[in-house]
Image (cartoon, rainbow, N blue to C red):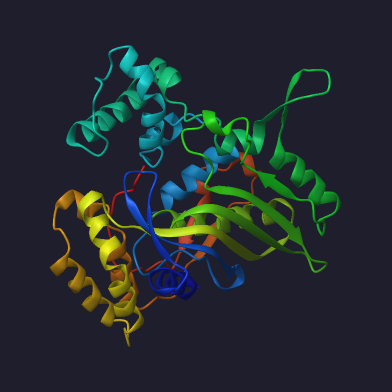
């Protein structure tokens, strides 16, 4: 199953339909629109083995979503910083007004990184500060469990989308209306990050096997997508257990899948040399050949540390040179889905290649 991710990655770097885009996050990217992969969960848990992934942040974020929470204090208290940068940016203007941080910090600069560290520490240590500045906006958990709408009488009400879908699946598991949407147009401008994984739909067959399909509009292939594959495969297993079904397939449908290409100078180099990069990757004859393309990039592109930290192209080339290993298995305690804790999840037989570190563009 790891092979599907690697083939998709290679297609982004070689397809006639892929191209360079100036990203919305001060970083360029190489992008391919439209794709689909599927993972048979009976064959194992699709956690990447071509680089080491930490399972705890995936579990904690999913628990956070399932509880309907949007304040990052839960994550920070469990040493998970994946939403820190987005929440920081979301609350920065308010913190500047109160003199907590100064104006004029350039994104990704030393001052910006140091301010983010201080922000995370204050979220963990100061309940009042976390209450005022820790919310990431009405993101996934809010939409999954507390979708707000105005009824015909003008009253604001809430829908627990996930709870309602589970109730409906108990009545008719083979139905076609079991869908949960995170894209609430009225709330999108208030979010720290518009939903990347926009909606998911579930159905079962008459043999009691559950399939779940995700549509993801924006897909950070190196950092985000491996996380999303694991998270939604995990969600499929949680929901199957909740409904006494067998988890069968996770189907992943992509909008814009892409690799970030560094910041200003390095991105400009990729824009100018994309055709040659595509030809070099197309002509690789074995896994190890991807390291030759990696060497060509590092020899010819701008070599500044901050540029390289945000270059995900070199990171995926290193992964493409590695042989996938056997998939692990995931065991989840049989508990109500909204009462699960980190101790209820156990990964067995995970022996990946070494970690490959890069920073996330926000």
Q: Position of residue 66 (x, y in %)?
A: 59, 40
Q: Residue at x 64, y 44 (%)?
A: 337
Visible in this render: residue 68? no
Q: Residue at x 59, y 52 (%)?
A: 333
Q: Residue at x 45, y 32 (%)?
A: 74
Q: Residue at x 61, y 71 (%)?
A: 42
Visible in this render: residue 107? yes
The image quadrant where one finds the C terminus is: top left
| 197, 32: nearer the viewer | 32
Above or below, 10 relative to 178 = below
| 140, 313: nearer the viewer | 313
Occupied quadrant, residue 157: top right
Q: Position of residue 319 (x, y in %)?
A: 33, 70
Above or below, 296 relative to 267 = below
| 93, 135: nearer the viewer | 93
Occupied quadrant, residue 176: bottom right
| 18, 224: nearer the viewer | 18
Residue lying furthest front: 272
Residue lying furthest bottom: 285
């Amino acid at each position: 199953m790891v092979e599907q991710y690697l083939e998709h990655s290679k297609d982004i770097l070689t397809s006639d339909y892929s191209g360079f885009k100036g990203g919305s996050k001060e970083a360029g990217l190489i992008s391919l629109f439209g794709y689909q992969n599927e993972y048979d969960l009976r064959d194992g848990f699709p956690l990447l083995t071509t680089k080491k992934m930490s399972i705890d942040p995936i579990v904690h974020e999913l628990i956070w979503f399932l509880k309907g929470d949007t304040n990052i204090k839960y994550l920070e208290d469990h040493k998970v910083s994946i939403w820190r940068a987005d929440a920081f940016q979301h609350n920065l203007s308010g913190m500047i007004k109160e003199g907590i941080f100064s104006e004029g910090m350039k994104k990704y600069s030393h001052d910006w990184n140091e301010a983010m560290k201080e922000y995370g520490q204050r979220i963990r240590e100061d309940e009042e500060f976390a209450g005022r500045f820790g919310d990431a906006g009405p993101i996934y958990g809010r939409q999954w469990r507390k979708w707000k709408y105005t009824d015909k009488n003008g009253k604001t009400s809430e829908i627990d989308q996930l709870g309602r879908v589970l109730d409906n699946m108990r009545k008719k598991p083979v139905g076609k209306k079991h869908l949960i949407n995170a894209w609430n147009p009225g709330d999108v401008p208030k979010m720290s990050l518009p939903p990347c994984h926009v909606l998911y739909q579930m159905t079962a067959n008459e043999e009691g096997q559950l399939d779940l399909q995700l549509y993801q509009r924006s897909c950070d292939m190196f950092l985000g997508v491996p996380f999303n594959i694991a998270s939604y495969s995990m969600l499929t297993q949680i929901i199957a257990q909740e409904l006494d079904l067998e988890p069968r397939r996770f189907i992943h449908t992509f909008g814009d899948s892409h690799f970030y290409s560094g910041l200003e100078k390095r991105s400009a180099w990729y824009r100018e040399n994309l055709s040659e990069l595509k030809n070099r990757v197309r002509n690789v004859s074995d896994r190890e050949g991807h390291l030759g393309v990696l060497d060509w990039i590092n020899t010819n592109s701008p070599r500044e540390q901050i540029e390289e930290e945000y270059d995900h192209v070199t990171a995926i080339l290193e992964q493409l040179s590695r042989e996938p290993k056997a998939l692990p298995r995931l065991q989840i305690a049989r508990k109500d889905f909204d009462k699960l804790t980190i101790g209820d999840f156990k990964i067995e037989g995970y022996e990946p290649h070494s970690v490959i570190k890069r920073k996330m563009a926000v």
